[in-house]
Image: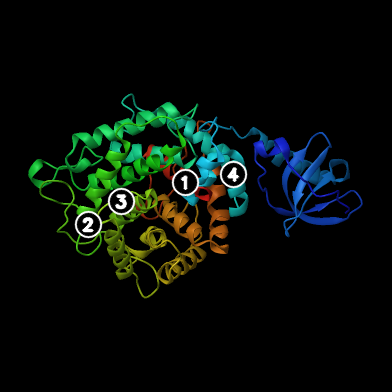
């Protein structure tokens, strides 16, 4: 098959996401073959735009394609065109985006997100699914700015992570108001509680506390507030109390770390118990909060030593099989459920791939090969979220294999209103029975390519 000259520029097509569909064999009307992926359509020239394995990009006249290839191009290009596009955070200068940590930069325009999807083995349908979820979050926000019916600190943190992961800031035309209301809810919640904890369940034993939920909520919300602080430099408006709220929250996490390098609940005055032992399930959320504290470049006393203690703690939880957590499959805190969060935490806090994390990834991929992710058999979204972070940060074929297995199932589970139907877990603690929690985990997994 002869192809025309390489494309110099995609012009307006980049606005609709020059995203990969998949590498496939194309056939022309003469039976000649070429292996390439669809990246766009030039309607004026009646040509499809494709990319070869070596990265070369070409246009092929539509009239030269076989009927099946014409149908394929039409269907996949229509999916790209139909993807609902949010207004985004407004016009942001290249200099402002360059001032962000590298991992944040792909979020802030459609073409960057689509390129991240292409490179990571995603599909253009993911963009549509994420935007649909964000629209539902906007619709379902509580009047006080929170999300969810219970554990509102955590649910608000999760929803904000989804907005921020898509590059939506307090100044976004479509979602900015929801982001502002959510952040103000968390800031006010932190102001009400000792140590700035983002939870209504902050009390310890002597103050009528409510179990350990507050520790989980605090870590999840701290990550959201931290990401909002990092991206606030893109805007022109000061967000009152944001920095102070984040710094107080991180200082609490640092001060409440146990001697083992983990975190625990059951304290006397606040729900944290710095004299307690270790809880890898709880700690996995705290690793993410510490990571965003690291990339803010704020001078926070004790942060570096806290991170080093956390890294050492993760290593102590590694089993001889390479996973992290308990070695008994039926036990609650086991390596089959916790290895994703721990391996991701080790990579994030170390700032690079590590031998310990590599062994963890090997364990995860071996397990997923033996028991492939299945929405109707083992839909453990808590675990899938951890696996997603670890495998993406580690990179390579392991990530693309996981993405090819899981992303289509999440897309298929999304309902017309943007929510996600419930799967069937085989580990109760991995379930996401709460609709807000389920929506957040599904959205965050879909955003992994660029968040």
Q: How far apart, in angstroms, are the residues tagged by discs 1 and 3?
A: 17 Å
| Front of the two marks 3 and 4 | 3
Res 13 label: none
Q: CA distance from mark 3 to mark 4?
A: 31 Å
Please tell me which residue lies in front, 147 or 438: 147
Q: Secondary structure at mark 1?
A: loop
The residue wearing badge 1 is: 100
Disc 3 from disc 2: Cα separation: 18 Å
Could you tell me residue 237's position as x and y percent? Answer: 41, 29
Question: Upstream in the sequence, badge 2 or badge 4?
Answer: 4
Query: Mark 4 = which residue?
Result: 112
Spot the residue most to the top.
143
For the N terminus, the quadrant is bottom right
Mark 3 closeness class: few <14, some 14–19, many ≥20 residues within 10 Å: few
Marks 1, 2: nearer the viewer: 1
Q: Secondary structure at mark 3?
A: loop
Q: Position of residue 22 (x, y in %)?
A: 68, 51
Q: Is residue 61 above or below residue 148?
A: below
Mark 1 / mark 3, whichever is N-terminal: 1
Name the outermost residue toward the bottom.
320
Residue contact between numbered discs 4 and 1, judged by CB atoms under 8 Å:
no
Of label 4 and label 1, which has the lower sequence position?
A: 1
- Image quadrant assignment for residue 190: top left
Left or right of residue 396: residue 148: left
- Along the line of sight, the residue nearer the viewer: 316 or 364: 316
* Relative horizontal placement of residue 393, taking residue 250 as reference (left or right): right
- The answer to which of marks 1 and 2 sits earlier in the sequence is 1
Residue in view at x 14 percent, y 59 percent? 275
Mark 3 or mark 4: whose residue is earlier in sequence: 4
| Residue neighbourhood size for the residue with mark 4, other residues' Cα within 10 Å, grouped as few (<14), some (14–19), many (≥20) | some
On the image, numbered disc 2 is attached to which residue? 257
């Amino acid at each position: 098959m002869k192809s025309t000259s390489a494309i110099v520029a995609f012009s307006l097509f980049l606005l609709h996401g020059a995203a990969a569909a998949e590498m496939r064999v194309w056939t022309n009307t003469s039976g000649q073959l070429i292996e390439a992926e669809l990246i766009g359509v030039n309607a004026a020239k009646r040509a499809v735009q494709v990319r070869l394995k070596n990265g070369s990009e070409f246009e092929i006249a539509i009239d030269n394609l076989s009927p099946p290839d014409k149908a394929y191009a039409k269907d996949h290009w229509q999916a790209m065109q139909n993807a609902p596009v949010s207004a985004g955070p407004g016009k942001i200068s290249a200099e402002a985006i360059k001032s962000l940590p590298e991992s944040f930069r792909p979020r802030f325009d459609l073409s960057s997100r689509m390129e991240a999807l292409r490179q990571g083995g995603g599909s253009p349908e993911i963009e549509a699914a994420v935007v649909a979820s964000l629209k539902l979050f906007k619709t379902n926000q509580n009047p006080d700015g929170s999300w969810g019916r219970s554990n509102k600190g955590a649910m608000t943190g999760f929803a904000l992570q989804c907005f921020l992961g898509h590059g939506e800031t307090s100044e976004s035309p479509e979602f900015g108001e929801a982001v502002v209301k959510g952040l103000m809810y968390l800031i006010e919640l932190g102001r009400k509680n000792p140590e700035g904890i983002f939870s209504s369940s902050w009390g310890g034993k002597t103050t009528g506390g409510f179990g350990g939920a507050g520790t989980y909520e605090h870590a999840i919300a701290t990550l959201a507030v931290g990401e909002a602080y990092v991206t606030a430099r893109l805007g022109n408006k000061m967000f009152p109390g944001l920095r102070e709220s984040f710094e107080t929250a991180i200082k609490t996490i640092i001060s409440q770390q146990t001697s083992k390098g983990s975190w625990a609940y059951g304290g006397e005055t606040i729900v944290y118990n710095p004299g307690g032992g270790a809880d890898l399930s709880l700690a996995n959320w705290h690793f993410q909060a510490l990571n965003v504290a690291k990339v803010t470049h704020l001078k926070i006393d004790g942060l570096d030593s806290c991170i080093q203690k956390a890294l050492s703690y993760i290593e102590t939880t590694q089993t001889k099989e390479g996973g992290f957590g308990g070695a008994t499959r039926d036990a609650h805190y086991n390596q089959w459920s916790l290895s994703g969060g721990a391996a991701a935490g080790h990579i994030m806090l170390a700032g690079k791939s590590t031998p310990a994390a590599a062994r963890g990834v090997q364990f995860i991929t071996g397990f997923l090969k033996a028991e492939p992710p299945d929405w109707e058999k083992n839909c453990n979204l808590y675990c899938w979220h951890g696996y997603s972070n670890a495998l993406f940060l580690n990179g390579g074929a392991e990530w693309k294999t996981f993405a090819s297995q899981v992303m289509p199932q999440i897309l298929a589970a999304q309902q017309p209103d943007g929510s996600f139907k419930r799967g069937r877990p085989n580990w109760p603690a991995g379930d996401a029975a709460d609709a807000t929690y389920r929506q957040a985990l599904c959205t965050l997994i879909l955003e992994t390519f660029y968040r």
